[in-house]
Amino acid sequence: MMSQTEIHTLARQMLEQYGQAAIARAAQQAVACESRGEDDDARAWRHIESAMKIIRGPGQG
């Protein structure tokens, strides 16, 4: 399991690299992991997705 620091670091890096598309990319990764039965990885991607939404802030959607 990833630490909160790791999750937020990855979320920030993805937002810098992919902009608003980063959230969709994280969601796609989560779905892909779920389809392969990789529940822990899927959960991590969902946490990263949530962190990006928090970092982005309200009204950015």
Image (cartoon, helix red, strand yellow):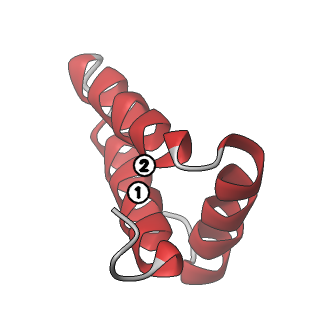
Q: Residue at horizontal 35%, vertical 39%?
A: 27
Residue 53 in percent (x, y) is at 40, 69
Q: What's under tag 2, amino acid-wise?
A: Trp
Report the residue at 48% width, 63% height from top: 1
Residue 57 placement (x, y as % from top left):
44, 81
Q: Residue furthest top?
A: 36
Task: Check disc 1 and give the amino acid type.
Answer: Glu
Q: Which label number is shown at residue 45?
A: 2
What secondary structure is found at the residue carrying circle 1? helix
Label of residue 13 in the image: none
Split into 4 quadrants, where in the image is the C terminus? bottom left
Residue 18 found in image quarter: top right
Asked whether 20 or 44 is in front, the reply is: 20
- CA gap, disc 1 to disc 2? 6 Å
What's the residue at 57%, 76% (across, down)? 3
- What residue is at 42 percent from the left and 49 percent from the top? 45
Q: Residue 5 falls in which quadrant of the image?
A: bottom right
Q: Are marks 1 and 2 in contact (CB under 8 Å)?
A: yes
Which of the pair 31/3 is nearer the observer? 31
Q: Is residue 51 left or right of residue 61?
A: right
**Residue located beneath label 1 in the image:** 49
Say above or below: 32 vs 3. above
